[in-house]
Amino acid sequence: MDRLKLVLLGPPGVGKGTQAALLSEKFGIPKIATGDILRNEIAGDSPLGKIARQTIGQGKLVSDDIVIEIIKDRLKNKDCERGFILDGFPRTVVQADALSHITDIDSVVSMDVDHPEIIHRLEGRRTCSRCQKMCHLEFHPPKKEGMCDDCGGALFQRKDDHRETIEKRLLEYDRMTKPLLKYYEDRKKLFPVNGMGSMQEVFSKILSVLGFSG
Ligand code: AMP
């Protein structure tokens, strides 16, 4: 593979982050997640973080201008020369149009699972306050309650993983992000994948739709 510029599309909790990490490792290209970048800004209490904290906590989308600027900057990095995997960007048609002016995307993999399953996945998700690694109380429980398996940091439930906020995020997805399915379908870039199944099963499906063998 010479170069791969990939977008992962799908509702929150569908497993984009997990698959982006697997793809990043397989192809040796960076996974770029606007959600992670924004959470870092929040952790650092930067001016941008202060704006993002409130919006994210309400399950709403951060403004297009902000995330477009973040991506424009990030894609200039040398580590993107052989491509990248975008996780959580674009999330609106405005962002997709802006992206098309920044660079040419090769393919968009859209993942889907039904909403009750998403709520189940997100509600049980816990994040490490130190290394940000995620686990799931039911599917991948921590060895020691409340403690990250990797670094021993305290686990917490992200505010946007509370039931009420999850439902708002799903509404935002349907309203703002779902139109991107047609947007990329019209441009012959869309590769839909069913997000149900194990991490490895979904990974194999993604590789297969992209024409790579597992
Ligand atoms: P994520 O970790 O991708 O679910 O992102 C967490 C939150 O960050 C989202 O619910 C949004 O509030 C915000 N966010 C992340 N990416 C974007 C984006 N591309 N556009 C707008 N808001 C975003």
Image: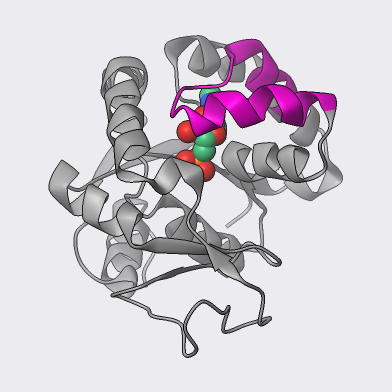
Q: Is residue 29 left or right of residue 138?
A: right
Q: What quarter of the picture does the N terminus occupy? A: bottom right
Q: Is residue 145 left or right of residue 45?
A: left
- Foreground residue among 97 and 137: 137
Q: Position of residue 104 (x, y in %)?
A: 58, 26
- Which quarter of the picture shows residue 175? top left
- Foreground residue among 196 and 172: 172
Q: Is residue 202 on the magenta stretch?
A: no
Do we see residue 165 in this rendering?
yes
Dominant secondary structure, magenta? helix
Q: Residue at x 71, y 66 (%)?
A: 130
Q: Is residue 40 left or right of residue 94?
A: right
Q: Position of residue 63 (x, y in %)?
A: 59, 14
Q: Residue at x 51, y 76 (%)?
A: 146
Here the colouring is: one colour
- Foreground residue among 17 and 63: 63
Where are the magenta residues, as a range?
Answer: 47-70
> In the rendered picture of this protein, how many numbered marks are placed on residues?
0
Q: Position of residue 60 (x, y in %)?
A: 46, 23
Do we see residue 194 in this rendering?
no
Q: Position of residue 152 (x, y in %)?
A: 66, 82
Q: Residue at x 24, y 49 (%)?
A: 118
Q: Is residue 86 left or right of residue 213?
A: right
Query: Is 206 located above or below residue 3 in the figure?
Result: below
Q: What quarter of the picture does the C terminus occupy? A: bottom left
Q: Is residue 52 on the magenta stretch?
A: yes
Query: Is 160 located above or below residue 76 in the figure?
Result: below
Q: Residue at x 44, y 59 (%)?
A: 19
